[in-house]
Amino acid sequence: MERAKALSEKATDNAMSSDRKNTREATRLRGLIKSEEEKLRELKSDLKVKQTEAANFQSLLENLEQNKEASSLLHSTNDRLATLKEQLKQAQGEIKEEYNFRLLDEMWILMGFLPIAEEFRQIVAKLEKSKRGQQSKYDQEIGAKKLAKTIQQELVDGHVPLAINVPDENTMREMLNDEICKVCGRPAHKGTPEYAFMQARLDAFLASKKTVEDEEEVEPLFKNDYIGELNRMYNTMHNNMRFLTNLDGYITKAIFFNFEKHSQIDKISANIEREEESKKKILAQTEGLTEDQLVSAYYEISEWWSGRMQAERSSEFLSTQIGQHETTLAKYREEYSKISEESSAAMYARSSQAILKILNAFTAAKQTNKREFLNQLENAANEYLAELNKGDFRGTARIVEKPDDSAEIILVDVDGTRVYNPNTALKTTMYMSLLFAVAKLTTIKHENDYPLIFDAPTSSFTGSKEGDFFSVIGDIQKQTIIVTKSFLTEQENSLGESLLDKPKIEKINARKYRLKLKRPFVEEDLSTIQTVIEDI
């Protein structure tokens, strides 16, 4: 009819072109008609796109509704995983186990140095004392008796006196000014023997300096100050003794800290594994949405609602536009028909109008018949759904058309809301019901017929529901082939074959066959495997 419409319009146009009286007006109207038809094609194409967009957004929202609990759980799981992974990264970054480097970089190698430092101090002190004794004897030998008389520097009771420069000049002057002996801590006021002793020590030191300057240079006993250098070295080490004292505890604490961090990392890693396993289970239970879609649901739901509403508003606007252009097109066609009636093209014009009306009738009838067929299919499917779910919740089956001219069957509750997560048995019976309905309608129409073939159809059914299934099958007047293990018991014969459940088989009024392996066979050799078909 589309082709007939095009040919009839072309014939009318050709006939009109020979009518000089109406040629100009006919050309104008034909141009307007073609323009309106082109606009209508574009608008209908845009309408289909927008309807598809609205359906896609609706599908996303429905899937979100279906999986909102999974989405919530996944969102929480991902939050916990992010926190745990950040804690793991932080704990791993806090571990410092470069012990070989820390031996030198943080001076851990000195942990056992304290006994060595003490032994070093004792050796230096012994050397210092020996040096002072040898220096004292040497001074006596070179004529230092005069100086010794002044300060009475001589060996008393076998004890070696301090060197003349100990304490040094500045310290001696400070003690005299403060009138206290800062060596023993006792007061030494002016006019007391103590004060006079300190003054004498200072005067003797100054006199010794003057004597040394006046006297001829005497070859020193010790030409180098190695012992003094050792003493200064010890003083430098002594300043770091506090660090060495705490080093043992510091190292122990550092190693224990690393052990604790490893224990913490093990616990965090175990928690991460548990959360990852939980995440896998959540994703395994969702259908139609990827992880990214589930995660983004919280952030994109408003966008999806907005997208659907915008697509629906655009669809409404386009539908209005289509209606307006269809009215305009009808007006132009009517005007064109009037001028055609007044010309030699009247016959062609009437034929074109008749063909157009037939085409419109066919188009409307096609859609009406489609909806009527889907309604019949829906009603028949619900009859079978009720039979297959006696005593159980079944809902109502609805066949929904989509913008792409396809359709899908869904379950709805009594209030019209969709049942998103029917159990496996209910979902199976829903599709079975549709299959039985198709078989029933095709048999009634006598347009064609085909066998129904089922492979383990009742694997998710209870015993009573399985009985309902075979009861429905018994009423279907068409060839039906069912492959099932439902009539095998758990008992085995001597060959290891499952025994038949004869009471159940006797209830089935149909041809029955047993398919089994031919025995014996070689388990490792595929060529020995054969199928035996026995008539029951």
Image: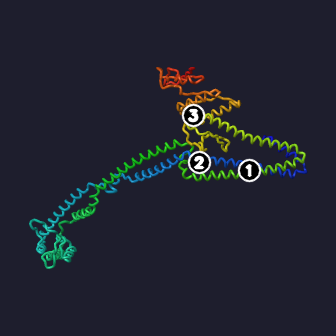
Q: Residue at x 46, y 50 (%)?
A: 80
Image position of 401 (left or right of 273)? right
Q: Which residue is mark 1?
A: 322
Mark 3–mark 2 distance (CA, rounded to whole Å): 32 Å
Q: Position of residue 27 (x, y in %)?
A: 85, 51
Mark 2–mark 1 distance (CA, rounded to whole Å): 28 Å
What type is the residue that disc 1 sits on?
Ile
Q: Are marks 2 and 1 in contact (CB under 8 Å)?
A: no
Quick one: which residue is furthest to the left in this view?
Answer: 157
Quarter of the figure that contains the N terminus: top right
Label 2: element kind: helix
Nearer the observer, 35 or 464: 464
Q: Are marks 1 and 3 in contact (CB under 8 Å)?
A: no
Of circles 1 and 3, the one toward us is 3
Q: Of marks 3 and 2, which one's residue comes earlier in the chain?
A: 2
What type is the residue that disc 3 sits on?
Lys
Q: Which residue is mark 2?
A: 61
